[in-house]
Image (tube, rainbow, N blue to C red):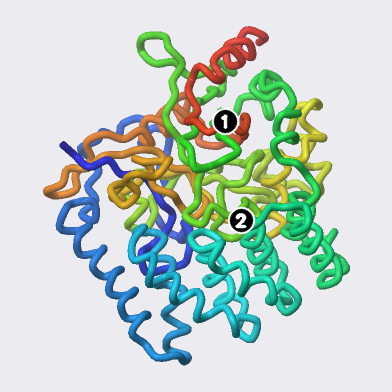
Amino acid sequence: MPMIRWAACVGLLLLGGCAVVPGEKRHSPAEIAAYQHADFVAPIASLDGERLAREEALQTIRTAVALPPGLEAEGMVPRALWNIGFLNAEKPAGLALVLAALPDLADKDATYQRGILSAAYTLYASEAAPLVMPLLTRITTPREFAIAAYTLLQADDSAARRDVIRATLHVQFPNWQHEPRLQRLDYVLTTDLRQAIAARPPLVDLLAHPIRTGRPVVFSFQRQDRRRFGLAVVRGADGRFVRNKDGSVFHIAHLANAITNLPGTITNGNTPQGLFTIVGAGTATNKWIGPTPYLESKVPVEATLAEYEHVEKIENSWTEAAYEAFLPETWRGYTLFKEAYLAGQAGRDEMLMHGTTINSDYYRGASYFPGTPSAGCLVAMETWDAREGRMQTSDHLALIKAFTRDGHDRGYLVVVELDDRLAPVALADVLADVLAAEAGK
């Protein structure tokens, strides 16, 4: 039996995301249509390749734990903590590293702060909260302040805790309304997110909206709690949803959960909710993504307004109104769906749709098993031969074939949270709206 693996936009020894490297191979719709499973081999997905990479990652953790305090340790600790989250292993060692780093964290640079605070939020919120609270008045960068605040909310989501955080936010950052990460944080502090998603506009309006005529669209349906499987369908360039050979609606499982599980406006957080543009397909150099072509999805600012319109040039620049103009009228005032716009304003990028070579056994017992979390990307299942890493199955290859079936590789990605149910998204959850949207054509 092959091991099931899912995608993660990470390297075991790197904190980066799914970087698109200039000069890497791009794939035309005709090439994608011709690809077969046998065309793809990923040595890292073999038993030997995975074992070696895992041992290297574990060695990074051991080295960080053994180093005495100092610059060398500070250079190693964030990488070690990322590996602990990625491997879902050595958590007691990670707790010791986090607790040791927190007292002096405000005196360190922002990148180091981010690594420590992200691990605190993801793995150790309750243990870290007493040491994080005094940091709030000393952290001077918006991203790190937001991560610290979300960590405190993880440990205690009471009204009193929210009031303290919000008061500190407004004192620390008087112009918070103009900073996207802090703007989103203030919204979270003052909003019942379950009530907000319960007021979601009609899904059928979003599914029927052409965005721009003649462009294919991937719709990725998610739960508010991203630690559940989502589901993706594809609307073709002709406005009809792609079908399987038996006439049923094509769909695959889709995971939009980051290792950190941080909100979508934060670096390496969950894939933000909202509208992305898709600007072709390429091959990643990140071995954990694997050789299957990714779809390059971009948020506003990362992509120009012209890239969203899929034209050569537009003189206008991004505004919230420009983003809303791509949406159906009923969705334009829905704050939750503007997360992708804020994420782009915050500098998020390189959130792709891609395949995987990661061993799902790292996450056995998790609510998203047999999936693996990412660094902010959307991921689909693939399986590989354990002996040499040759592809056996790929939901992601099926997805990109469905997207490019009409000869187009430019279009859109819509990430939408359906509700707050603690269950994977099933086709039955959206099928009536899919069919109603199509029937209205």
Image quarter where the N terminus lies is: top left
Left or right of 17: which side holds 5? left
Image quarter where the C terminus lies is: top right
Mark 2, residue position: 154
In percent of width and height, residue 334 lies at 78, 35
Mark 1, residue position: 421
Q: In the rendered structure, which amino acid carries the disc numbered 1? A: Arg
Element assignment for label 2: helix
Left or right of 90: which side holds 312? right
Q: What count of labels does the image hold?
A: 2
Instruction: Report, in whole angstroms, how far the alpha carbon at label 2 lies from the one at label 1.
Output: 19 Å
Rendered view: 268 above or below 101: above
Left or right of 242: which side holds 320? right
User: What residue is rendered at 22% in x and 36% in y?
Assistant: 392
In percent of width and height, residue 210 lies at 67, 24
**Going by the picture, which residue comes out furthest to the left?**
387
Left or right of 227: which side holds 358? left
Q: In the rendered structure, which amino acid carries the disc numbered 2? A: Gln
User: What residue is rendered at 33% in x and 61% in y?
Assistant: 89
In percent of width and height, residue 157 lies at 68, 52
Who is closer to the viewer here, 311 or 244? 244
Sequence order check, earlier mark of 2 and 1: 2
In percent of width and height, residue 151 lies at 62, 61
Snapshot quadrant of residue 134: bottom right
